[in-house]
Amino acid sequence: MSTKYELKNLATSKATQMDAISGTIGPDVINIAALVKEQGVFTFDPGFMATASTESKITYIDGDAGVLLYRGYPVEQLAEKSSFLEVATLLITGSLPTKAQLDSFQHSITRHTMVNEQLLRFYQGFHHDAHPMAMVSAIVASMAAFYHDTTDIYDPRHREIFAHRIIAKLPTIAAAAYKHSLGQPSVYPRNDLRYCANLLNMMFSVPCEPYAIDPVAAEALDLLFILHADHEQNASTSTVRLAGSTGANPYAAISAGVSALWGPAHGGANEAVLDMLDSIGTVANIDKFLARVKDKNDSVRLMGFGHRVYKNFDPRAKIIRGMCYRVLEKLGKTDNPLFELSLRLEEIALKDDYFVSRKLYPNVDFYSGIIYSALGIPRSMFTVMFAIARTAGWVAHWQEMVSDPQMKIGRPRQLYTGPKRRDYLVIEKR
């Protein structure tokens, strides 16, 4: 049974009928396409807080209930039982793979990890203190100049090769950016290592001595990548879709997503958590800091708590919290003042009525920054790690969009508040 809504213009008494469209779960959406034609008006929704920009079968979020589903599977189950590459396969294809399918996907990813040698020379054009996200965004965009066999967006085989190639090469590109910032030689990927272990080896090994990969560190990265793999129509995913809707090559679309993720309100939030902890200094200063957070006249914010979508506990935070403690204990970091401060801040905030009443619970960014720091990953690389994980979701959304025969170029409208028509005056009369 379809539901109809009616919008009536009080000035003209003209009414417009609008159909409600139901998804499998979640709130209905109202089809407002007739409003412009029949009423001559647009809707106004700054930040797209109440606008469904697309139809998708990939990820579902219920912010009030704290629910996150990838293709219908609860993220808690995937975090416990799956791996990042299996989750990537699920997001892209829509189904959990068989063992043979997963083995084939993992083999393809492993064989695509090397990048064209000329791409590695691009890094020499960046200053040593260039932000890694600047390098990653530029290198990803440059891939379109090398891999022409995957730029026909209407060819399913091109789309498949691109999906495997970008997921495989992002860790190599990211690690090379990190090595460039250190002035160290880039480390080539190894086919005998799994995805996250390979990334750690490319980041931290050096030619002059062997590097032992900590299995807990690799496991922690894999978990973080699962939890960051997709998150519905967030800013960077929407950017990938918008750029891709023009028919741009997929590398350009992913590069646009990397740039959008760079913002401190999005992918840079976990870096902001560590900056906040530095500003607090010691456990003794927590009460003073929280008093400033509660002061409406103070601009200080509590980073890593609360979420724009989740009005309950972030389901990813519940999962990552346990891994955070495990990593700290395994790596002997529990006596580190920064980690002691973060855990004490968490304890106090979770008992404070001010934050509890506002449902400001720790989110995934609060714990992920602590884990990355414990693993020795510098803050400038936090958002890069996020980009590696989110590429799986970006690819899934891009593929879903370009394979839709009804795909349209994105074209938001606006409320114009500038000057009305005025005539040009020659410069002598101004």
Image: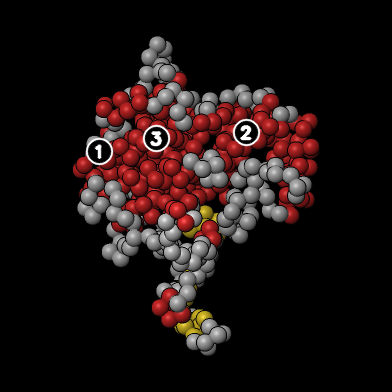
- Residue identified by numbered label 1: 145
Disc 3 target residue: 136
Pinpoint residue 235: horizontal percent, then vertical percent: 48, 51
The x and y percentages for residue 122 are 32, 28
- Amino acid found under the numbered disc labelled 2: Asp
Crowd tier of the residue under label 2, counting other residues whose Cα lies within 10 Å: few below 14, some 14–19, many 20 or above? some
Tell me which residue sits at (49%, 67%) in the image.
Answer: 420
Q: Is residue 315 left or right of residue 54?
A: right
Q: Residue at x 75, y 38 (%)?
A: 289
User: If you read the primary sequence from the N terminus, does the residue marked by circle 1 or circle 2 appear first?
Assistant: 1
Identify the element where label 3 is drawn.
Answer: helix
Decide: marks 1, 2 in contact (CB < 8 A)?
no
For the residues marked 2 and 3, what is the alpha-carbon distance in whole angstroms?
Answer: 23 Å
Marker count (numbered):
3
Q: Earlier in the sequence, mark 2 or mark 3?
A: 3
Q: Amino acid at mark 3?
A: Val
> Label 1: how many residues lie within 10 Å, few (<14), some (14-19) or many (20+)?
few
Q: What's the amino acid at mark 1? A: Ala
Q: Residue at x 42, y 39 (%)?
A: 388
- Dot 1 falls on a residue whose secondary structure is helix
Q: Is residue 251 visible?
A: yes
Seen as rendered, the residue at the extreme front is: 428
Residue at mark 3 to residue at mark 1: CA–CA distance: 15 Å
Q: Up-down: is 276 above or below 402?
A: above
The picture quadrant where one finds residue 111 is top left
Provide residue 68's location: percent of width, then percent of height.
52, 54
Q: Horizontal and vertical percent for residue 71?
A: 42, 56
203 horizontally vs 270: left or right: left
Residue tagged 2: 275
Residue 185, picture quadrant: top left
